[in-house]
Image (tube, coloured by chain):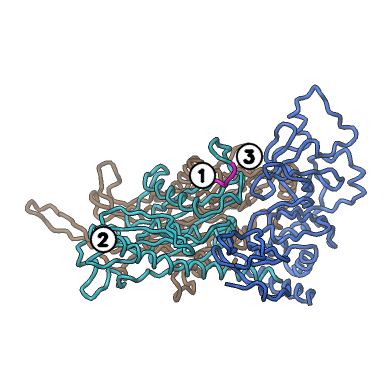
Chain colours: A blue, B cyan, C brown
Amino acid sequence: MMDIDTEPVAADVAARIVTPGSAITSDPAFMRGHGTFGEGATIYSSVAGVVERINKLVSVRSLKQRYSGEIGDIIVGRITEVAAKRWRVDVNSRQDGVLLLSSINLPGGIQRRKSESDELQMRSFFAEGDLVFAEVQSYFADGALSLHTRSIQYGKLRNGTFVAVFPQLVPRSRTHFHTLPCGVDIVLGVNGYIWVSKHVSAAKVEANAEHIYSDCNEPISDAEREAIARVANCVQLLNRLYVKITETSVIFAYEESLGHAAKDLLSQDVAAELAHSVMARLKQQAS
Amino acid sequence: MSRQELLSPEGLRVDGRRVNELRRILCRASVLNTADGSAYFEQGNTKVLVAVYGPREPHTRAAGNSGERALVNVEFNVAPFSTSERRKRSKGDKRVLEIASFVRQTFEGAIQRAVYPRSQIDIYVHLLQHDGGTLETCINAATLALVDAGIAMDDYVCACTAGFVDDSPLLDLNAVEESSIATPALTVAMLPRTGNIALLQMESRLPAAKLEDVMEVAVEGCKHIHAKLDEAVLAAAGDLAAKLSH
Amino acid sequence: MASLILSPAEQDYITQGVERGLRADGRGGLDRREVTLRTNMISQANGSARCRTGYLGVGTDVLVGIKAEVNSWTAGEPEDRGAVVCSVECSPSAAQEFEGYGAEELNVELTQLLDRILGGPQSGLDLGKLCIIPKQAYWVLHVDALVLDVKGSIVDTLVWAARAALLATRLPRVVVESIADEDGNMQSEFDVVDDAEDQVALEGAENLPLAVTFSQIGKRYVVDASEQEEAVTQARVTVAVSPQMDICAIQKSATARGFAPSLLTEILHSARAIAREEHARFKRVFEAASSDGAAGEPSTGSTFLGTF
């Protein structure tokens, strides 16, 4: 059994990995957090993962798990169902999220038409399959996430392609929307859903305020399309390497990838080679 | 097969093992990359592949789903090429459903279902090759896959079979031994930390006096299997942790 | 095929990309993804192969096992040849909707398609050599496929896996003895030799075809469609081509529309050119799979233990 009090607290210590049923401590001073359970005086782990201690709270962070939402999270979700005054949204979690009609932007000019059925009007905003960039505003009583898109940068996603990655590879940060130096926009959803698209300037977005629910893409040039494919493939590569996906790591991967055609980035040989050079750059940056 | 053929005078079984020898175990987690968790498990010539999805949105909002605890759903698929005589089993095959049901009940007890209200955990088990110990290998493989998926459990669930021939308990029966009338076949699944028995199943006759001996041997087998599973989990976890720390 | 719902914007992005020859993952219209192949992981089967089409360990994933059985001939069956019977089952691990009986329709469709390609003399296998004693006994080869994951291009992957499994198949040798009985008629008996060292490969297995599936998206078509591309595919044609460049089978499926005859002709031309490349690729990949450094390690394990 590990005695937590003597464990060094330094961040780079290979923190102890425990497995289900492992005893962590019997010290009564500690409280049980995620990934643990108590029996008698002892705290046990319920998952395979790394023990974390914050003051008196002991928890085990499982190395792989579904997304668990927190208020303020910036995510990408896919509409799965249109219901009365709300949409169900797949957010890669153990329950679908909910987007209420009252939580979306209704730009000037779109009046609620009483003559049309609610459902028809609902579909004029979001329909099944649509991808939405949103923020977690609260929880429902049953634990489902309640989303909102009430800022101009949120809403329906267009002009690009979708990639899914392990949620634990997307760290929570101040911003989740980035314009990369190569001219491609990327949305890094904390839930592991990523959107890679043609860059559209903020000014243009503002100017098109009343078309925020349009399903039409901007015209996209071949060069832009190639760049989008390259970035999307880089994100997939970082995912399979189990590397944190941030603006920096994506830029590094993009730059290292330029010696190869976009379509070749995911083949075994090229991927293995890129893995080396990307990891090297990340290590260099960390030191 | 007669008693004598299952156990030679020198104490060797049909595959050359001694009475208390486990078959060779090979196992690994994270083998199917789309699933939330997965595992491949080989015990002797029996081969099982498991994919776990969840916790996720339940696919039927069925009445009877209490909602407060995760629903555990198990589907068991027996490949037609898995047995020495090829046989395609229907989805409604009684034996297939029975094993799925045993696996489900076993894990309903071990998974901390209250941690995942209003969701569902799907365990898809595939038997790729059959050489005895079907239920035991399915349970062992499923444990590994569930741990791989990061699903909270009270403990590992480790299972093993045992039999009895010539006054000797026999550990870990292969297909020849299992199908022989000369020995009963007992399957035990336990949670190693407390020693609690999660599942106990036997299909033939065993003198009551011998039950304890056979159980003891099976439980020892479970402990060995626990060590193997733990090794595989630590290997996969160590690998991921190292990658993540960059 | 399994339903993936995309937004109108995604569908348009994919379609426009295909029409400009720049697919979402950077591929050109005729570029195929990587194939990973392992053989003989099911030691109790006569042959087996696992094939994955995709990238970095994620893709359409098929496991095929071959079991050979001796059948007694009954009147009405062909008198002097054996048979190949296919069966495909999709696991719920590939899609949640495949649970229970959810995959029945797809299983039937894929089974029939595989049977059409492999189930008769058109497959290239020498079915005559599978006859043990005419009008008495013959080998049946059961080709059973388990689909573990679907990420587009399921048919092409199935055929790759089946071809590899059949090439890796070894049958026990059969000894046939014929003796004349009292009336001077020849009576034949056979004996299956139980010796793992004395086994035979399938005659004609090297003639087996590969399948190339063309998916029409907008005004163009692509080969080896991804899952997303299949969601916007309007019509699909699968062409099976032998190494000798003979067309063994053609099947059109999917639904929104038909193919213009001129497009079909173009596709058939394309099919042979692509099949030529695919057969060459198959040869390389198959040789590597068989000589996989699994000598020290049980070969079963290595199928599922790849890094990517």
Picture disc at residue A68: none
Q: Which residue is drawn at 44% across and 67% down?
A: B225
Residue that carries the numbered disc 2 in the rendered image: B209
Q: Position of residue C99 (x, y in %)?
A: 51, 44
**Label 2 – label 3 distance at C-alpha:** 78 Å
The answer to which image quadrant residue A44 occupies is: bottom right
Q: Does the magenta stretch include residue B69?
A: yes
Secondary structure category for the residue under label 2: helix
Q: Position of residue B227 (x, y in %)?
A: 47, 70
Q: Position of residue A42 (x, y in %)?
A: 58, 64
Pinpoint the chain carrying mark 1: C
Pinpoint the chain carrying mark 3: C
Q: Residue at x 65, y 60 (%)?
A: A32
- The reply to whether residue B245 is visible in this rendering is yes
Toward the viewer: C241 or A215? A215
Q: Is residue B154 magenta?
A: no
Picture disc at residue C260: 3
Same chain for marks 2 and 3?
no
Magenta: main secondary structure equals loop
Residue that carries the numbered disc 1 in the rendered image: C99
Q: What residue type is labelled 3?
A: Ala
The answer to which image quadrant residue C179 occupies is: bottom left
Toward the viewer: C77 or A81? A81
- Can you tell which of label 1 and label 3 is closer to the viewer? 1
